[in-house]
Amino acid sequence: MRLAEIIELRPVPAAGLLATLTRRCPLSCAHCSTSSGPRGEDTPGGALRRFVAGFTSAARPEVLMLTGGEPLLRPALVADLAALAAVAGTRTSVLSGMFFAADGRVPDRIMRALRDVSHFSASIDVFHEREVPRAAVFRAMHSIRDSGIDVSFHVAGTAADDAYLADVTGAIRGEFRDQAAVLVNHVRPVGRAAGWAAARTVPLREPAEESVRDVPPAPCAMAAWPVIAFDGTVVACCNQLVVDARPVPGHLRLGHIAEDDWATVRRRCQESPVLRTVRTAGVGSCTDCRGLARRPAALEAAERSGSRPAAGVLDVLGARLQRDAGAAVLLRRYGSDRYAPLVLLGGAGDADPAGDAGGISRADDQEVPA
């Protein structure tokens, strides 16, 4: 499964499920958004297995994304969840910091964990490279790719003109001959980076009685996939402040894996009037969205807007238009605009036999940057 396929599904309500398996991580990267460390909490494994076992062919996410912390600190759980998901037809993707690859080898326990995984992404950036050498990561990724799993890289830098980004993306493209996609993000002031990364948030709008009609349209694709947080709570977006905050704002809480099944969470995600409004028109910035409970007039307006007869149709149409636009277009909004086309690399085995050189998607006309 190519990374571009996963990203194209991102705006589609309940097409994917993000599951954090643990906040533990043996690395101590200075930019970690989850502030993970050696003594972080584990998401309840039994509840995760029961929840994923509830997927059916008629009601399942297309993609299950396993992350952390470091998900491969729990290799047996990764293997179980991927196998359970596969029974229903759901494909699994894993994102790892590559702690296991310092010598370039992939331990047997890790390869066993990946036997039912369709996509594997490695985080690599200046912070990870201080703990796991680039050459070792590349060697391990070749082994994983040679086992039949599509691979990609998640790269973070300080800004579009960061010299490191040009260097590492060039190295990845050369090493993997454009057969590994690259998703590039900029470091944001969250988690351990909160004290040093430059803030890029939009200020909260005032006054408090402002209605949703006063806010310029800004559809939010990040409110489309449910996210299982470290305590088993299911939230409606992947914003780290939402994942970590307790209590979760009511309009962003979808349930709990110990109490609710996937069908229930899926229905709440797809049918919530407020989430429909967030996805199709937006309610301002992430700060505005998290703060809706403190702005009753805005919350009521969002509820009213998303309850209109046409709201469900607009939600589906908006998701379809964003999906059809392609992965690179979405990443221009949420990742690095300059490097967005690199997400279209890879997938030699899935390429259109009629052409599409280098695995570049039909959805974008611009060239992948050299």
Image (spheres, rainbow, N blue to C red):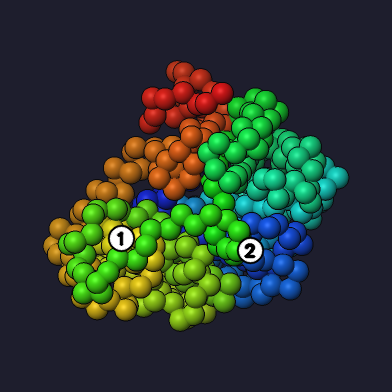
Horizontal and vertical percent position of residue 73: 73, 62
Q: Residue sitting at 72 percent across and 40 percent down?
A: 141
Q: Residue sitting at 65 percent across and 48 percent down?
A: 123
Numbered disc 2: secondary structure: helix
Q: Residue sitting at 83 percent across and 48 percent down?
A: 102
Q: Picture quarter containing residue 46?
A: bottom right
Crowding near the residue tagged with mark 2, few <14, some 14–19, many ≥20 C-alpha atoms within 10 Å: some
333 w.r.t. 17: above or below: above
100 w.r.t. 246: above or below: above
Observer able to see residue 217: yes
In this figure, which residue is indicated by the disc labeled 1? 284
Q: CA distance from mark 2 to mark 1?
A: 26 Å
Q: Are marks 2 and 1 in contact (CB under 8 Å)?
A: no
Q: Residue sitting at 57 percent across and 51 percent down?
A: 187
Tag 2: amino acid: Arg
For the view shown, which residue lies furthest in the left direction? Answer: 309
Horizontal and vertical percent position of residue 263: 40, 68
In the rendered image, which quarter contains the N terminus?
A: top right
Q: Picture quarter containing residue 57?
A: bottom left
Horizontal and vertical percent position of residue 243: 50, 69
Q: Nearer the viewer, residue 331 or 275?
A: 331
Q: Nearer the viewer, residue 175 or 108?
A: 175
Tag 1: amino acid: Gly
Crowding near the residue tagged with mark 1, few <14, some 14–19, many ≥20 C-alpha atoms within 10 Å: many
In this figure, which residue is indicated by the disc labeled 2? 192
In the rendered image, which quarter contains the C terminus?
A: top right
Describe residue 311's horizontal placement relative to residue 336 as left or right: left
Q: Nearer the viewer, residue 6 or 322?
A: 322
Describe residue 362's horizontal placement relative to residue 158 as left or right: left
For the view shown, which residue lies furthest in the top direction? Answer: 354
Describe residue 113's horizontal placement relative to residue 294 as left or right: right
